[in-house]
Amino acid sequence: MFFIFGLRTKVARSGVVTAVCRNCGNQAAQVITRRSTKFTLFFIPLIPIRTRYVQQCSFCGTEYAVAKDEAQRLPVG
């Protein structure tokens, strides 16, 4: 008998915020995404391993991690 297991990451777009980028300094749309990684068994996601929030600048494309409370506090429009 053998088991098929692995990890699956689901990316969900939380919203878009207009703010100043930390990298380039331009005011542009910042896309907030939630990346959730889960352990899968027979292609069924079972156990959440890690959840990260990422903010990406639409002007320069730089991505950087954002804390969960900061991501939920940003005024999404």
Image (cartoon, rainbow, N blue to C red):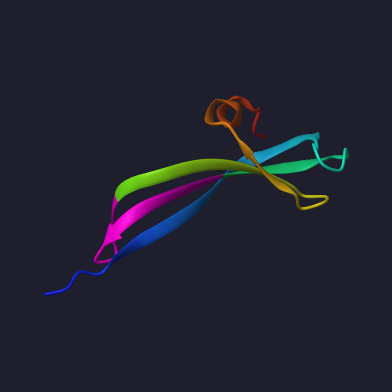
Q: Is residue 58 left or right of residue 74?
A: right
At a point 88% along the width and 40% down the height, the residue shown is 26
Count of marks overlaid on the render: 0
**49, 54: nearer the viewer:** 49
Which residue is drawn at the image coordinates 82% and 51% (left, top)? 60
Q: Residue furthest bottom?
A: 1
Residues 28 and 39: in front is: 39
- Quadrant (top left, top right, bottom left, bottom right) of the N terminus: bottom left
Name the magenta segment's main secondary structure. Answer: strand
**Residue 68, percent across and down?**
53, 31
Can you name the residue that lies furthest to the front here? 1
**Residue 62 picture location, percent across and down:** 75, 49
Looking at the rendering, the stretch of residues picked out in magenta corresponds to: 34-46
Name above or below for residue 68 compared with residue 9: above
Residue 55 covered by magenta stretch: no
Give the side of residue 33 with respect to residue 8, left or right.
right
Residue 47: x and y in percent read 29, 48
Q: Position of residue 73 (x, y in %)?
A: 60, 24
